Image (tube, grey):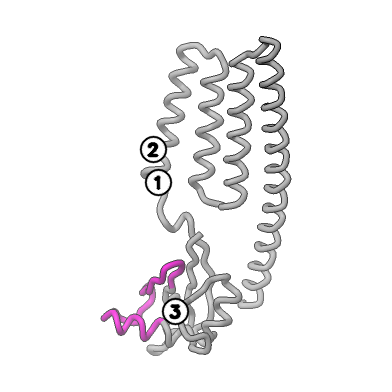
Amino acid sequence: MIMKQFLRKTMKNVAAYVELFLSAVLVFVIVVLIIKLIGQCFFDIWHDKIKLEYYMEYIMSLAIGVEFVKMLCTHKPGTIIEVLLFATARQMIVEHLNVYETLVGIGAIAALFAIRKFLFCSFDEADHMICRGSQTVARANFISGTNIPEEKTKLLRDVISEKLQDEGKNVSIGACVYYQDCALRIDNVKQGVVTRVEVIKNL
């Protein structure tokens, strides 16, 4: 089970590096297009051919590209909302919409803001992995990609049990201890001994 989770984590990391590479390619393209846009802007101003609508459409498209890069790099639900907000706003600003289409666009933006405010929670932006309670902190950090600030040779079950006792909490399923960038949650207990610990990483 642990090997499966480790392989799954490894493949996920490989996919993340591929996404970062694609993001780098997209950033390069965006930078080139910005340089091209600046050059074209000076040329159009010099020849008195500048068209505001064209530049608004161009710049909004570049802004959507930037938000898309952020979405690939951070994997946060909020960045998806930002991409959709930019895309909707671009459509409304650049295109000549009628009254009905404008109202629909405003409603879509309002719905996106409401989704971000009321339907997102901190768990949406977290990654987690189940580890054996007998695993050391060092191994748990390695396979989960976290940095649990405890002695590396200590067992997870001892770490979470001691922390819960220090906080005056019961050692039971669902009990959690929190660190700055991660948390530990008891996933299973047998005869008073923690057998599985969920390591939760904030993204």
Q: Which residue is mark 1?
A: 119
Q: Can you identify the residue that label 3 sits on? A: 188
| Residue 169 among magenta residues | yes
Residue at x 55%, y 76% (from the top left corner): 141
Foreground tag (2 vs 3) = 2
Residue at 50% x, 33% y is 85
Crowding at label 3, few (<14), some or many (≥20) Cα neighbours within 10 Å? some
- Quarter of the rendering occupied by the N terminus: bottom right
Is residue 86 shown left or right of residue 178?
right
Count of marks, rendered view: 3
Badge 2 or badge 1: first in the primary sequence: 2
Residue neighbourhood size for the residue with mark 1, other residues' Cα within 10 Å, grouped as few (<14), some (14–19), many (≥20): few
Q: Which residues are magenta?
A: 160-183
Residue at x 46% of width, y 69% of height = 182
Indicate whether residue 93 is drawn in magenta: no
Asked which quadrant contains residue 40, the reply is top right
Res 175 → quadrant: bottom left
**Label 1 near label 3: C-beta < 8 Å?**
no
> Is residue 162 placed above or below 59 in the rendered structure?
below
Nearest the eye: 160 or 50: 50
Task: Give how far apart the Cα atoms at labels 3 and 1 are.
Answer: 29 Å
Q: Amino acid at mark 2?
A: Ala
In this rendering, the answer to whether 85 lies above or below 145 is above
- Lower position in the chain sequence, tag 3 or tag 1: 1
What SS does tag 2 mark? helix
Residue tagged 2: 114
User: x%, y% of residue 26?
Assistant: 70, 42
The residue at 63%/18% (across/down) is 54
